Amino acid sequence: MAQPAKYIMVINKIKEWIQTGKVKPGDKIYSENELSKMFQVSRHTIRQAIGELVHEGLLYREQGAGTFIAEQPETLSPSLPKPTTSGKNIGIITTYISDYIFPSIIRGMESYLTSKGYSLFISSTNNEVEKEKQCLEAMLERNVDGLIIEPTKSSGYNPNIPYYLELEQRNIPYLMINQYYSQLNPPYILMDDEKGGLLATEHLIELGHNKIIGIFKTDDLQGIYRMKGFINAFRNHRIPFQNDTVISYTTEDLPNVFHEKIEKLLAVPEQTPTGIVCYNDEIALKIIHILKAKGYRVPDDISIVGYDNSALAEASEVKITSINHPKAQLGLDAAKWIVEAIEHPDTFEKPNVTYEPELIIRESTKAIQ
């Protein structure tokens, strides 16, 4: 039990540095070796703590340069919209702000939009439809010139469609990222998630695995398409597909139901897979922790593939094989798209963008012996 206490101690201390101003946005923090000596803990403990702080958006990594204190974006409370200001304003609504890959996406937008003289008003829905409604109302009230949004629970009908139609009636351009509402046929920038799910699954098949399960979130289109790619791999390679080959979950399932489903799977030795394809890296890390507690070794007993190539993929004790997500590039491309749509409404063709997935192979997968 000592490891979690040390891990939390490091996180809390670095958070204290940030809150008290000992370190400021843009400052480079100590190296892993320096932090290890400072806190008298292992480098693995430091790596886990730094990975969590990157995940929370408090730190960010630059390849070859080190780890830095993040600039926290201005946030907009849906219930307390700020007074409307004159000038060039862009609204950004994401499902989350400080979690997972979103800080990198937002930094990609921010760097370009601020260079073009735009102000950013950022809000998050926490993947809740009612909060999305509040965010949209706030953005319309402040008369934004354009809106970039990541939809909430996009796999079903969204009751906030009237707000998007109002944006269109007001000639306010909007762009959806990562997923979209199919009822609207809106402009979007996203990943080819079906192909990504296929690549992740075929990687395990090529390593000799044929007892593979997939774990997918089903209240957004990303999860649906990744699951579709997963199923296509079984079809293409003529591998038997059973009822328990897919474990699905929703946003609300994560706290309790998700863990129960995994426990139930592992309770029957004959059902234990040799490979697992996960909806994203966050789920992959949760699975690795559950498997470790049950005495399974990754990848010796079970291989794991994540998705998004987030900071979590390298923060784990076992580095996670993952499908790359062009986080900062997506943010930059979205920013360029919305500026063109605002400044050249009559000539801008508003093309959709779909990124090709790329598999990043790390330590969490290996061939069947």
Image (spheres, grey):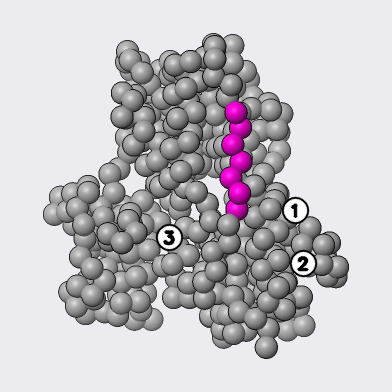
Query: Residue 245: which numbered mark, if any?
Result: 2
Q: Along the polypeptide, which appears first: circle 3 or circle 2?
A: 2
Instruction: Name the residue that disc number 3 marks.
Output: 311
CA–CA distance between discs 3 and 2? 28 Å
The three-letter amino acid code for the residue at tag 2 is: Thr
Residue 72 vertical position relative to residue 163 in the rendered view, above or below: below
The answer to whether residue 228 of the structure is visible from this angle is yes
Q: In the image, residue 247 lies at what x, y percent?
A: 71, 62
SS at badge 3: loop
Within the image, what quadrant is residue 81 found in? top left
Residue 220 is situated, as x and y percent measured from the top left of the image, at 65, 45
Residue type for callout 3: Ala
Asked if the stretch drawn in magenta spans residue 133, the answer is no
Q: Residue at x 60, y 71 (%)?
A: 304
Q: Residue at x 52, y 33 (%)?
A: 149
* Percent coordinates x, y for residue 242 in the rendering: 83, 68
Position of the N terminus by quadrant: bottom left
Amino acid type indicated by mark 1 = Lys
Which region is colored magenta?
351-357
Q: Would residue 220 appear left or right of 101 to someone viewing this image?
A: right
Question: Closer to the camera: disc 3 or disc 2?
Answer: 3
Image x and y of residue 177, in percent: 55, 37
